[in-house]
Amino acid sequence: MLDTVGIPVWLLSVLAILATAGVYNYVAAPLTRRSMQRRSSRVVRQVNPRLQIKLSTFALTRRRVLADRLSNDPQVMKAIESAAAERGVEIDTVRREVAKIAYEMVPSFSPYFYFRFGHRFARAFMRFMYRVRLGEMDDAGLAAVSAEASVVFLMNHRTNLDYALVTYLTAKRTMWTIGAGEWARAWPLRPLLRAAGVYFLRRETNDALYRAVLKRFIQMVTEARVPHAVFLEGALSRTGGLHKPRLGLLSYLTTSFDPKTSPDIVFIPIGTNYDRVPEERTIVAHASESFVNRSTWFVLRGVIEFIGYLIAQRLRGQRKPFGNACANFGTPVSFSAWLRNHWVDWASLDRTGRFYWLNRLGEELMSDIAALIPGLPMAFVCSVVREYGDDAFDEEDLRVRYEARLDAAYEAGCHVYLPKGDRWLGYGEALHMLRGRHILRLGKDRRFRANPKDKPLIDYYATSVAQFLPDAPNRRSADCVD
């Protein structure tokens, strides 16, 4: 009974692995899950009464349940049958594919993570990088939004930090969900973003089955009144200006809408702007084929370099190394009211008619977003620098033109944000940043010249406010164009 038994090392290793897996699956994982559920429930009880837009039970549903509900939805089942018939394969094969798509797509929202860690991290991270300000907000309009309405935030897309910025500014009002592209699939971003309510998109796919699953998921989110954020442009702006609205997600949001029976859909336009965007050089290089074919390692290397830059700035005691960041929230637009004002019988329209009116709606909402984009000192300084081209200029002339630009923007209705309300403080910070990054060079003649290699960056930042400056060159690129 007490004799020693010898076993091979390989068998001992297998037994150790199995024992570890068993402890994790049957002890550690369930205990952790129950602990997080209790903490999340406690956070919901504490936070929900204070939120302007309450948490939906749909958002609190477990990921596996959401994925099963989505993959077994009647409309998705019809898409599965059609795909199986078209491909000539068994329905079960397509169902397994859809189950995988659904589980990949849906979020696993954790109130505890979102309100205890996510918001605090976004707040600390954004406030380290930027002087963050909430500019305009129609508090009366937001307060008038019905609790029964489905709220959709529509915003311009300047950087992948847009989500962190607006999450930080709205966490005391609501929780929202948003779609993220392929860039967010890398570990450890993916589990963190899922816990923050983010769902994942394959943006460049034309697979009809995938689109059917995505469409139904968007409709389920809308019907459950989960606040939803959408980048109306569909992708990061490569020029600094706004592009034409993409109507895909907008059509998914409104396809099943019935003015008589459906909850109202309320669109809230948001305009964001930054003195400096972290991925600026990647964005302006995005049009070149050499960049498009870059590997995943190239992207990861860029992230590592960015983190190293932030650490170096902290060690140097540099505060707000990226300048200012600002967001403006506009007046809510009720979809039901918009249809009534345009005498549109939505239920009777065919697909062509609906896309015609969605295009009209998208253009109006994009105009609202364009009017809300904050005017920041960096953009106005770059707008002046762009005028000089290759010519040299002195600082006094730059100051005069900068002031004229600010006055013109105010007259055009631009929501200008100036640090401490001082136009010259903002001007000095912008000039210091441009010189420190060698985008502007001071010659021996004490005159400035733009670095020829950095002209695309100057154009990028100048274009963000070009819609407010009628006499600015290349103004057209800031309008709603491709």
Image (cartoon, rainbow, N blue to C red):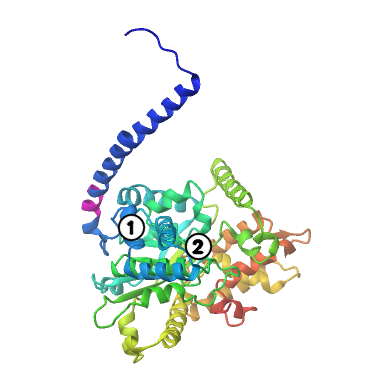
Residue 325 % position (x, y): 48, 61
In front of the other: 194 or 370: 194
Callout 1: 10 Å neighbours few (<14), some, many (20+)?
some
Residue 275 % position (x, y): 55, 62
The residue that label 2 is drawn on is 202
What amino acid is found at the position of numbered circle 2 in the picture? Arg
Q: Is residue 8 above or below residue 102?
A: above
Residue at point 64%, 69% (across, down): 459
Q: CA distance from mark 1 to mark 2?
A: 20 Å
Quarter of image, res 14: top left
Q: Is residue 350 above or below residue 23?
A: below
For the question of whether residue 61 can be seen, the reply is yes
Residue at point 49%, 81% (across, down): 411
Q: Which mark is residue 68?
A: 1
Question: Is residue 280 inside the magenta stretch?
Answer: no
In front of the other: 406 or 272: 272
Residue 158 % position (x, y): 52, 65
Q: Which mark is residue 280?
A: none
Q: Nearer the viewer, mark 1 or mark 2?
A: 1
Callout 2: 10 Å neighbours few (<14), some, many (20+)?
some
Residue interval drawn in magenta: 42-47
Q: Main secondary structure of the magenta part?
A: helix
